Image: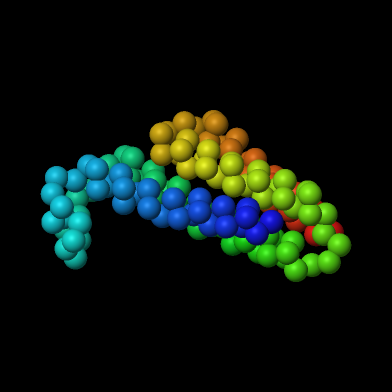
Amino acid sequence: MLFWILAGLGVFLANVLLPAIIYFTQSETLTSHVGSRDDDPEPSVWVARARRSLANMHENLPFFLTLGVLALVVENVDMGQAILGAQMFVFARVAFMVLYVTGVPWLRTISYLIGLVGCFKMALALI
């Protein structure tokens, strides 16, 4: 389970870095990145989507981490089901991030729901 918690944090880190990476590739000069950024240009559609994907991850990560840590410390947990739920969450969140940034609507929603089901599987494993 610890591996999947760390994998979830890795997906979060990728979500954090993605808007900056996209912005960096679209800006004209290096000096626009080292200043105070008081006069940033409007974000491109890709950067805006990456930021919204990150905001969504901020909403879902605490639920996942709480369930993952509880699975490690609570006795008599169905660890197989908890790990399967964590795997579902991690892979679904990777897909969600990619689908959100590329603008694919229905598959993005399905990947979100798969991640949510993964969290519910983790919660059921605790009972």
| Left or right relative to 108: residue 114 | right
Residue drawn 19% across and 65% down? Answer: 36
Query: Is the residue 71 above or below the residue 4 in the image?
Result: below
- Please say whether residue 116 is visible from this viewpoint: no
| Left or right relative to 114: residue 46 | left
Residue drawn 60% across and 35% down? Answer: 110
Query: Is the residue 44 above or below the residue 124 in the image?
Result: above
Report the quarter where the C terminus lies: bottom right
Observer-nearest of 116 and 9: 9
Q: Position of residue 6 (x, y in %)?
A: 57, 57
Protein image colouring = rainbow
Q: Position of residue 90 (x, y in %)?
A: 59, 47
Q: Position of residue 27 (x, y in %)?
A: 19, 46
Q: Position of residue 41 (x, y in %)?
A: 19, 50
Observer-nearest of 113 and 20: 20
Residue drawn 69% across and 56% down? Answer: 1
- Please say whether residue 50 is visible from this viewpoint: yes
Q: Quadrant of residue 112?
A: top right
Observer-nearest of 52 and 67: 67
Count of all numbered marks drawn on residues in the image: 0
| Left or right relative to 102: residue 60 | right
Residue drawn 14% across and 45% down? Answer: 28
Work out which residue is located at the far front of the displayed protein and give it. 3
Work out which residue is located at the far bottom of the displayed protein and give it. 73
